[in-house]
Amino acid sequence: MKGKPKEPAVPPERSETLRQLIIELIDGHALSAKEISGNAGVSVKEVYGHLDHIQKTVDTKAYRFSIVPAVCKKCGFMFRKRGRLKKPGRCPVCKGETIEEPLFEIDRTVRDRERHTG
Ligand SMILES: [Zn+2]
């Protein structure tokens, strides 16, 4: 065993900025990882990494992270399995491989609450 600490692939500051950008992109807009990737200028793989982090660390008092599940275009099966962000490879029902990508969205719950009470 070597005691060398594992260094992150991206500097923390850059990750933080990117995460903020991704949050802003999907704030009120459901986007697929591919669309986020195009808008943020990072790879889809990187987007999934950030989404995973956002999902785990988002301030649930202020934001709600929601996922529109992937859907099989052939039979309409919905991939509701929680915790999985990535688009599934094939449908377990019809074995079809044409899958509609999952979409990610952030809702600002605080803003909504203020609107209702104010
Ligand atoms: Zn299917």
Image: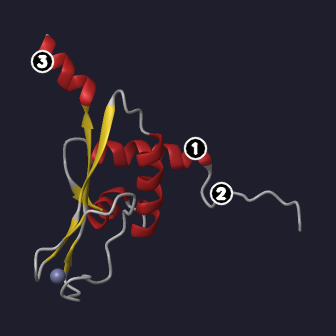
* Residues tagged 2 and 1 counted as in contact (Cβ below 8 A): no
Q: Amino acid at mark 3?
A: His
Is residue 30 found left or right of 38 in the rendered image? Answer: left
Ligand 1 is within 8 Å of the C-beta of the residue at disc 1 = no
User: Which numbered mark, 3 or 2, is in the foreground of this view?
Assistant: 3
Ligand 1 closer than 8 Å to the CB at disc 2?
A: no
SS under mark 1: helix
Residue shown at the point (80%, 57%) measured from the top left: 5
- Give x and y (percent) for residue 78: 19, 68
Circle 3 Cα neighbour tier, 10 Å, few/some/many (<14 / 14–19 / ≥20): few
Q: How far is the residue under mark 1 from the one under mark 3?
A: 36 Å
Query: Which quadrant holds residue 97?
Result: bottom left
Q: Is residue 6 above or below residue 20?
A: below
Q: Is residue 13 above or below residue 4?
A: above
As drawn, the residue found furthest toward the top would be: 118
Earlier sequence position, callout 1 versus callout 3? 1
Q: Amino acid at mark 1?
A: Glu
Residue 13 numbered mark, or none:
1
Q: To which residue does mark 2 refer? A: 8
Q: Look at mark 3 in the image and give the residue it sits on.
A: 116
In the structure shown, which secondary structural element does the residue marked by tag 3 occupy? helix
Left or right: residue 66 versus residue 60 is left
